[in-house]
Image: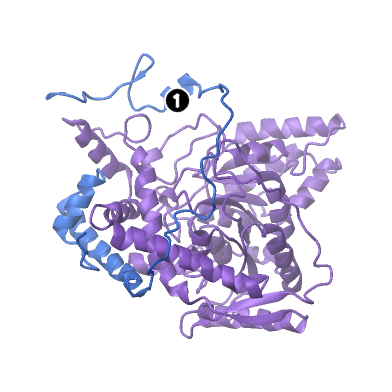
C-alpha cells in the first residue's frame, strides 16, 4: 500500500477506537507510504519504524482491553527536525547536529504520545529553521508535492509536504516568522501558529526565543483544534508557557452573521501579490460578505517595516541561541588540528553551519555589538511595540484579519538566490510573531492562470489567546471553500 | 554612541563580526558576506524613518517575568546518553583540547 491517503486525524482515530481498524495496519501503511512518496518529496529525513510499530501494538492492546487510547489514538505524526524525540536523531537540517541523539522528548511529543499519537519520523526543514523554502536543509531540498520543481515553502517545508502529499495526517512545525503558515500555504494544507505561550517550547531547538511557537499541520481545521487540545497548556519546563486552557468554541453556529472581518489594505498593495493570489482572496472576501460577514477596512501601516524589524530581532536572538553550538559537548567538531580552544570553536562552527545560518549569526552579532545596539536592536524593539499596538487597534474593530498568507504561490527551486528576495516571502507573517498573536493558513483553492494548479493560502489572524475563536472562524470559511486535498495525486 | 553608516558592512567589518561570532571564514566568503550583509542592512535602514521617540522597547510579547518553580530535586539527563553525543570522551568526561597555556 503506497498510495497516498487523505484521511483526517479524526477519521483515523475513530476507526481505531471503534475497532474497525488496527493501529498496526495504519502505521504499517504509513511507513510504506513514506518509503514510497519520499523519493518525490524528500519530506522525511528519518523513520522510527521499530518504535512506531511497538507503539501501534500498545494502542491495539488498549483497545482490545476496552480502554480508550486517547483522542489521537493511532494517529501517525511527522515531527519537524528541530523538535526532539528520543527516537532517531535530531539534526535541525544542519551538519552541526548530524547524528545528534536527544536524551529527552519535547513536551509536545510527550503530550502527543499520551494522547495516543505515534511519531513516525522527522521531517526536513531549513537549517535551524532559517529560510522560507527548505532549500537551506543540509539533507537536500524538500520538493512541493503539487510540482516537484518547486519549493514547499519553509522553514517547516517537510512537515507541510508530508501532510499535503498524503503521507501523514498530522505533523508538527515551528513558526518564528511564518515557518508554519507559509509552507502550509504553498503546499495546500492547514497550518496553525498558536499565540505565543500557548504551546510549550521545551524540546524545540531555540532560534528566536521570543518569537518561536510550535504548531500543527493538518488536512482539516477540526484536526488542528483537536491537536491544540492535546499540546497546549502550561509546562513547568518552559517558563514562557501560559496557564490558559484551550477550549474549542462553537458559538459561530449563526454562521458569518455579525462576524467582523478586517482586510488590511497593506496586504493588497497593487503589484505586490501574484494576480491569482490577489483574485482568489478577493473572491473569498466577497463570498463571506454575501454570507453576512461585515468587511472592515483595516490599516496596518507598519506591514512594510516588519521584515526590517524581524531581521534585526530574530538574528539577534539567534546569534545568542546558536552560541551554544561550540563543538565541545555535542555537535560537529572539526577534524582539523587546532592549537587553541578559540580556533576549535571557530573552525567547528564554520564547518558545521551553512551560509544562511552564518549570515544570520553575523547579522545578529553585528546589531547587538557595542556602538550599534541602540541604532539597530533597540530601535527594532521600539518598532516591535508599535507593531503590537497597531494590531491591538485593529482588533478593536474586528474579530479576525484576513489576507493572503504569502504574496505568491510556490516558486521554482533555486529561483531566489538573493537573501532579501527570500525574506520578502514572509511579509504578511512576521509581524504576527513580533506581536505574539495567533494565525492560521488554510487552503484557499488552486491558482488559475500562470501558476495553474498551485495551492493558494488564506491567512487569518486573531488577537493573543483567541486561538479557539480563530479556529472556529477558520472552520467556518473552510466549509465554504471545500478544498479537495486528494487532487494533489491527480 | 557612534551612529553606524546605514547599509554598509566592509570586509574588515565582516572579519571583526565573524571573529566575535566565532566563525573562521575564508577570504572568498568574507567578500560575499560583506556584499549580502550590506544589502540586508540597507534594507533594514528603513527603520530610520520610523518615529520611535519615547516608545518603550518591547523584548517579549508576554508580560511574564521570573516564574519560579518549586524547589524540589528532579532527575537530570541520563549521563550515558548525554556522553554519547560528545565528539570526544574520556571515561565519564567530555574531552577537549587544552584550554589554558600554550601548546595543546
For the point 55% across and 66% down, the residue is: A186
- On screen, residue B69 versus residue A361, left or right, reads right
- On screen, residue A454 versus residue A418, left or right, reads right
- Taking depth in this image into account, of A146 and A218 the one nearest to the observer is A218
Q: Colour of chain B?
A: blue
Please state the chain letter of the residue tagged with numbered disc 1 in the rendered image: B
Residue A485 on image: x %, y %: 68, 64
* Crowd around label 1: few <14 · some 14–19 · many ≥20 (10 Å): some
Residue A109 on image: x %, y %: 61, 39
Chain that the image shows in purple: A
Q: Quadrant of residue A225?
A: bottom right
Which SS class for mark 1?
Answer: helix
- On screen, residue A271 versus residue B26, left or right, reads right
The quadrant of the picture occupied by the C terminus of chain A is bottom right
- Taking depth in this image into account, of A413 and A419 the one nearest to the observer is A419
Residue matched to label 1: B82
Residue A75 seen in the figure? yes
Residue A448, above or below A239: below
Residue A338 on image: x %, y %: 18, 31
Residue B52 on image: x %, y %: 38, 69
- On screen, residue A460 versus residue B20, left or right, reads right
Amino acid at each position: 500500500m503506497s498510495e497516498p491517503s487523505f484521511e483526517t486525524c479524526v477519521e483515523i482515530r475513530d476507526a481505531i477506537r471503534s475497532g474497525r481498524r488496527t493501529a498496526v495496519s495504519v502505521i504499517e501503511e504509513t511507513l510504506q507510504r513514506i518509503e514510497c512518496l519520499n523519493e518525490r518529496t524528500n519530506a522525511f529525513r528519518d523513520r522510527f519504524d521499530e518504535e512506531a510499530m511497538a507503539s501501534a501494538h500498545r494502542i491495539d492492546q488498549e483497545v482490545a482491553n476496552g480502554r480508550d487510547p486517547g483522542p489521537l489514538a493511532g494517529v501517525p505524526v511527522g515531527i519537524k527536525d528541530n523538535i526532539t524525540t528520543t527516537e532517531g536523531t535530531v539534526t535541525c537540517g544542519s551538519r552541526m547536529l548530524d547524528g545528534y541523539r536527544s536524551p529527552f522528548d519535547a513536551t509536545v511529543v510527550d503530550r502527543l504520545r499520551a494522547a495516543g499519537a505515534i511519531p513516525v519520523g522527522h521531517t526536513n526543514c531549513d537549517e535551524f529553521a532559517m529560510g522560507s523554502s527548505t532549500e537551506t536543509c543540509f539533507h537536500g531540498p524538500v520538493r512541493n508535492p503539487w510540482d516537484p520543481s518547486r519549493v514547499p515553502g519553509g522553514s517547516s517545508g517537510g512537515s507541510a509536504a508530508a501532510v499535503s502529499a498524503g503521507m501523514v495526517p498530522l505533523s508538527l512545525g515551528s513558526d518564528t516568522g511564518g515557518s508554519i503558515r507559509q509552507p502550509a500555504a504553498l503546499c495546500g494544507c492547514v497550518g496553525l501558529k498558536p499565540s505565543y505561550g500557548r504551546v510549550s517550547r521545551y524540546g524545540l531547538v531555540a532560534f528566536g526565543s521570543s518569537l518561536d511557537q510550535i504548531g500543527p499541520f493538518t488536512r482539516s481545521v477540526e484536526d488542528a483544534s483537536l491537536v491544540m487540545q492535546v499540546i497546549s497548556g502550561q509546562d513547568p519546563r518552559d517558563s514562557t508557557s501560559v496557564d490558559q486552557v484551550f477550549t474549542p468554541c462553537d458559538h459561530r453556529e449563526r454562521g458569518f452573521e455579525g462576524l467582523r472581518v478586517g482586510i488590511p489594505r497593506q496586504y493588497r498593495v497593487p503589484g505586490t501579490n501574484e494576480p491569482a493570489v490577489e483574485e482568489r482572496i478577493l473572491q473569498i472576501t466577497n463570498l463571506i460578505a454575501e454570507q453576512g460577514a461585515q468587511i472592515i477596512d483595516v490599516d496596518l501601516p507598519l506591514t512594510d517595516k516588519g521584515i526590517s524589524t524581524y531581521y534585526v530581532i530574530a538574528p539577534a536572538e539567534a546569534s545568542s541561541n546558536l552560541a551554544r553550538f561550540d563543538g565541545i559537548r555535542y555537535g560537529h567538531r572539526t577534524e582539523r588540528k587546532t592549537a587553541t580552544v578559540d580556533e576549535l570553536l571557530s573552525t567547528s562552527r564554520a564547518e558545521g553551519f551553512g551560509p544562511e545560518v552564518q549570515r544570520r549569526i553575523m547579522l545578529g552579532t553585528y546589531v547587538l555589538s557595542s556602538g550599534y545596539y541602540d541604532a539597530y536592536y533597540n530601535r527594532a524593539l521600539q518598532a516591535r511595540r508599535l507593531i503590537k499596538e497597531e494590531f491591538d487597534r485593529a482588533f478593536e474593530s474586528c474579530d479576525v484579519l484576513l489576507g493572503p498568507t504569502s504574496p505568491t504561490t510556490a516558486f521554482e527551486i533555486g529561483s531566489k538566490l538573493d537573501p532579501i528576495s527570500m525574506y520578502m516571502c514572509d511579509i504578511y507573517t512576521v509581524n504576527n510573531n513580533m506581536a505574539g498573536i495567533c494565525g492560521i493558513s488554510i487552503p484557499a483553492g488552486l491558482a488559475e492562470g500562470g501558476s495553474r494548479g498551485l495551492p493558494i493560502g488564506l491567512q487569518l489572524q486573531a488577537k493573543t489567546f483567541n486561538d479557539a475563536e480563530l479556529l472556529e472562524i477558520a472552520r467556518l470559511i473552510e466549509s465554504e471553500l471545500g478544498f479537495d486535498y486528494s487532487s494533489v495525486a491527480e | 554612541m557612534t551612529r553606524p553608516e546605514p547599509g554598509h558592512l566592509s570586509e574588515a567589518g565582516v572579519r571583526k563580526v565573524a571573529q566575535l561570532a566565532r566563525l573562521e571564514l575564508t577570504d572568498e566568503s568574507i567578500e560575499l558576506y560583506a556584499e549580502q550583509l550590506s544589502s540586508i542592512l540597507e534594507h533594514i535602514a528603513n527603520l530610520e524613518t520610523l518615529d520611535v521617540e519615547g516608545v518603550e522597547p518591547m523584548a517579549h510579547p508576554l508580560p511574564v517575568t521570573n516564574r519560579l518553580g518549586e524547589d524540589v530535586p528532579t532527575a537530570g539527563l541520563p549521563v550515558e546518553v548525554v556522553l554519547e553525543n560528545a565528539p570526544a570522551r574520556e571515561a565519564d568526561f567530555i574531552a577537549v583540547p587544552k584550554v589554558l597555556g600554550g601548546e595543546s
